[in-house]
Image: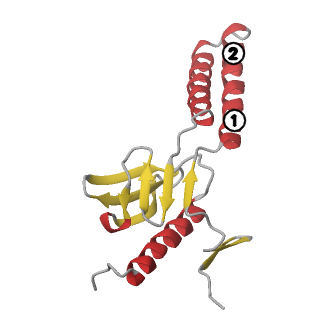
Amino acid sequence: MEKTKRFTDDAVSYDSDLLPEETIIYYSKPSNLIQMTISIIIAIAGIIYLTVFNEQPIGFVLTCTGAYLGVKKYRRATNPAPQIILNNKGVQTASTSFYTWNQIKGIKTIRAGSYKYPKTYLTYKHPKGHEQFLVEDLNVNRRTLDKLLKFYHNSFKEAYKTSPNAHH
């Protein structure tokens, strides 16, 4: 009986036989639509402050902030482009070309920014420079992304070891 590679993510176990050959990660539609709705409510509150209460500064700030965030979240919710593509051969993000695992150095997710409002980034070095891709509002969380990175990278290493063309 052949063993399969496996990792767990909270309540789900992943076997190498069950994971697709490629995982495509997109912006999360539900998350962005909820945030867009909240942003629209903020913009409406700003308009009410401007028109009903005649509170210019706070009304202006609320309206502009709500409108800006609403448009930003709408664009993410309706963006059909993959943000991250992972497979046994390598990685591609929305801002870089595809690079094979042997071209990538130091791939990891990091948290950066202020203590109160940290942001998560996927970082790695590649032949043309350094990638620091903001991992925000995606359909996977950081923990799942870390496990997928490890899984696909390890699958590449194992395939490379067993390949008849591998140079040892």
**From the viewer's perspective, is 164 left or right of 64?**
left
Numbered circles on residues, count:
2
Q: Disc 2 residue type?
A: Tyr
Q: Position of residue 99 (x, y in %)?
A: 35, 57
Helix, strand or loop at disc 1? Answer: helix
Q: Position of residue 43 (x, y in %)?
A: 66, 21
Residue lying farthest to the bottom in this orientation: 1
Q: Nearer the viewer, residue 119 or 103?
A: 103
Q: CA distance from mark 1 to mark 2?
A: 24 Å
For the C terminus, the quadrant is bottom left
Helix, strand or loop at disc 2? Answer: helix
Q: Disc 1 residue type?
A: Leu
For the N terminus, the quadrant is bottom right
**From the viewer's perspective, is 166 left or right of 35?**
left
Residue at the disc numbered 2: 49
Q: Residues within 10 Å of mark 2 (few under 14, many from 20)?
A: some
Residue at the disc numbered 1: 33
Q: Nearer the viewer, residue 142 or 92?
A: 92
Q: Position of residue 45 (x, y in %)?
A: 71, 21
Q: Position of residue 135 (x, y in %)?
A: 51, 51
